[in-house]
Image (cartoon, rainbow, N blue to C red):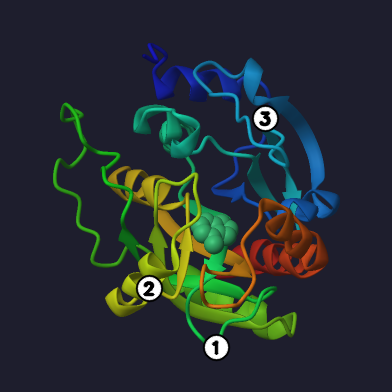
């Protein structure tokens, strides 16, 4: 149970800095290097923020930053709580409700994903055009929340304007940036080749274990959402190789500068949008 209300966490955060960013970025594998580009105003470990869960996966620090990226005020969340860690959805998405209560309007989610589309290569990036929720549950399941829609429309989960800005950032950084459908599984096992063949038939271009719960909750809260994946590996059975977390981290390390450049360009031009 998480007795802390997102509004209380947001009020707590407001006392930590005078900055009032409209844009928040959640960092997944392949994107943490952007922290080197961030002019940090304030860094806060998740452990100190009321209601925030502690992430347990290696490579995910669990810190919230107030700062400027490419001159734009931003909140950066380095590390996230995953469903596969055993957190209930309420905890997985608590940070998103906190961001909404804080006054964030636009949310950029980043993640690592396995490539299903045959044209994808490890090290490519993919802007989410849409998603398929295969996690077996929905983060909005539970009592209705007063003042928020019960049945949330997901016809345009990923905002057209923000998506356009990401694609522009890709062109600018000469980074291979695809567009596609992200399918979310609960994990933490990787998929079987048979599952990946099935997901391909369903229309998925990439597969991962995060982002979708956050995007759904963000839409319920009225935030505009964009998301981008770092394709860290080809999904099971697409290449001859077996999958490993080590490969995911290796690719993330190899393309970290491109990931950082994408996000920096996005933040810099966000203000002019
Ligand atoms: N499957 C699921 N999640 C992932 C993968 C994958 O192949 N790569 C990175 N995250």
CB of mark 3 within 8 Å of CB of mark 1? no
Front tag of 3 and 1: 1
Per the image, the residue denoted by label 1 is: 119
In which image quadrant can residue 16 be found?
A: top right
Q: CA distance from mark 2 to mark 1?
A: 13 Å
Image point 71% across, 38% down: which residue? Answer: 58
Q: Residue furthest right?
A: 36
- Which residue is more in the foreground, 255 or 216? 255
Q: Quadrant of the N terminus?
A: top left
- Residue 183 x, y percent position in the rendering: 39, 63
Q: CA distance from mark 2 to mark 3?
A: 42 Å
- Residue 204 x, y percent position in the rendering: 38, 73
Image point 80% across, 60% down: which residue? Answer: 253
State the mark number for residue 204.
2
- Residue 23 x, y percent position in the rendering: 56, 50
- Of the image marks 2 and 1, the number of the one nearer the N terminus: 1
Secondary structure at badge 1 equals loop
Per the image, the residue denoted by label 3 is: 18
**Residue 77 vertical placement versus 270 (above, below):** above
Q: Is residue 156 visible?
A: yes
Number of residues whose C-alpha sits closer than 10 Å to that of mark 2, classed few (under 14), some (14–19) or many (20 or more): many
**Residue 256 vertical placement versus 135 (above, below):** below
Secondary structure at badge 3 equals loop
State the mark number for residue 61.
none
Q: Is residue 99 visible?
A: no
Q: Quadrant of the C terminus?
A: bottom right
Number of residues whose C-alpha sits closer than 10 Å to that of mark 3, classed few (under 14), some (14–19) or many (20 or more): few
- Residue 148 x, y percent position in the rendering: 21, 37
Image point 65% across, 47% down: which residue? Answer: 74
CB of mark 2 within 8 Å of CB of mark 1? no
């Amino acid at each position: 149970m998480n007795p802390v209300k997102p509004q209380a966490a947001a009020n707590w955060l407001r006392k930590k800095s005078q900055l009032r960013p409209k844009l928040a970025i959640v960092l997944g594998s392949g994107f943490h290097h952007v922290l080197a580009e961030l002019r940090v105003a304030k860094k806060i470990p998740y452990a100190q923020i009321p209601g925030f869960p502690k992430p347990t996966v290696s490579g995910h620090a669990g810190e919230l930053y107030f700062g400027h990226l490419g001159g734009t005020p931003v909140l950066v969340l380095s590390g996230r709580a995953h469903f596969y860690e055993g957190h209930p959805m309420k905890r997985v998405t608590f940070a998103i409700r906190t961001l909404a209560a804080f006054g964030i309007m636009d949310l950029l989610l980043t993640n690592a994903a396995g490539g299903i589309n045959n044209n994808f290569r490890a090290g490519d990036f993919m802007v989410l055009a849409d998603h398929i929720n295969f996690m077996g549950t929905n983060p909005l399941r539970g009592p209705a929340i007063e003042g928020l829609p019960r049945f949330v429309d997901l016809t345009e989960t990923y905002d057209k304007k923000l998506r356009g800005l990401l694609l522009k950032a890709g062109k600018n950084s000469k980074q291979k940036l695809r567009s596609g459908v992200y399918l979310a599984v609960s994990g933490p096992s990787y998929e079987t080749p048979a599952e990946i063949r099935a997901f391909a038939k369903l229309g998925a271009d990439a597969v991962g274990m995060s982002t979708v719960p956050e995007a759904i909750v963000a839409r319920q809260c009225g935030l505009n959402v964009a998301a981008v994946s770092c394709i860290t590996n080809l999904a099971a059975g697409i290449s001859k190789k077996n999958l490993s977390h080590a490969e995911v981290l290796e690719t993330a390390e190899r393309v970290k500068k491109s990931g950082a450049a994408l996000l920096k360009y996005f933040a810099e031009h966000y203000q002019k949008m």
